[in-house]
Image: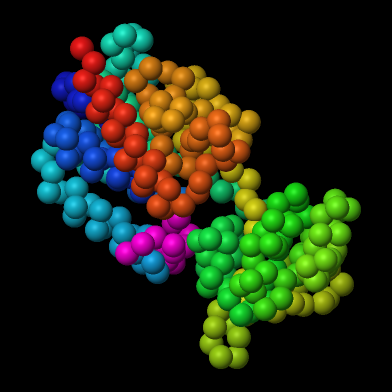
Amino acid sequence: MTDQHLHDAIVVGGGPAGLAAALMLGRTRRDVVLLDSGTYRNDPTDAMHNVLGFDGTPPAEFRATAHRTLAAYDTVELRRTTVHEITSAGTAAQPSFVVRTDGGEIAARRLLLATGLRDELPSTPGLADLFGTVAAHCPYCHGHEFRGTPVGLLGAGPHTPRVAGLMERIASRLVVLADGGTLDPQARAGLERRGVEIRPEPVVRLEPHPFDDGRPGLLAVLDGGDTLTLGGLMVAPALHQAAPFAAQLGLELRESGCVAIDAFARTSLPGVMAAGDLAHTADLPMPLASVTAAMAAGQLAAAAIDGDLLEP
């Protein structure tokens, strides 16, 4: 069924950025529809961290709290549905957009994309089952949970020395699992200066392996038979747009693959804003991938939408 009403804004994505944007728009009495597919980047994790007031909270509990908050604003409508296609239906001077969902079509004068990124993990056997618990990609979000234990760094990419620097105050010791890769000589020298162990062998598999005191951990089985017991593993996923809408709308992308936005979350297409992990300004090499940063980005984008709608 087609929704005949032309809404002020449609927010696509029910993560922290989209939720914060819907709240901001609701508080300015904007008619906004929030479309939530029920799939989120932080689905694998058992708890969010480094989020003031919600540290250690399961993501689902955070979203439930946000939904209860939004329910108090009668101009905000949450629809749990999958978006299939977005098209531009207006002009640069008077933009409008049509969003095709499982439940039909919805139209609005402004559009906010908050669909996030998708993590493509290394193909190491067993890693996917551990990701979000004893394997993580962000030292700020999950590093503290590995404190006082040996921590592995999977891979031999250029990111490895920086992650080692971030984790050396947290871990009891660090070991790079190069997984058959070759470290840059300068990176290797830097790691060795930090006292980081480097294991060049391919990783055959990873498996859960709690410590004797009950703390969670994992076992890394290396080619040749050696095993390492670790309290945590830092990985570097490849990042991809979680949804095809930036491509459908022909939005400009940055070298990172993320949507190009200005300081007010505006994309290259008039009337379209983007917030959260999927977008960043030219000042950053990649988005600040955290719940708090996504919420702030969503609020800023909503303010930009509200201001944009003031124009005659």
Comparing 63 with 221, the one in front is 63
Q: Is residue 106 above or below residue 149?
A: above
Q: Position of residue 9 (x, y in %)?
A: 25, 28
Residue at 20% x, 25% y is 7
Q: Main secondary structure of the magenta part?
A: loop
Q: Quadrant of residue 64?
A: bottom left
Say how many tags the image has: 0
Q: Quadrant of residue 193?
A: bottom right
Going by the image, does 180 lie left or right of 279?
right
Colour pattern of the rendering? rainbow
Residue numbers of the magenta segment: 42-53
Q: Position of residue 17 (x, y in %)?
A: 36, 44
Magenta segment includes 144: no
Quarter of the figure with the C terminus:
top left
Q: Position of residue 164 (x, y in %)?
A: 70, 63
Residue 301 in view here: yes
Quarter of the figure with the N terminus:
top left
Comparing 85 with 162, the one in front is 162
Residue at 21% x, 33% y is 32
Q: Position of residue 204 (x, y in %)?
A: 76, 66
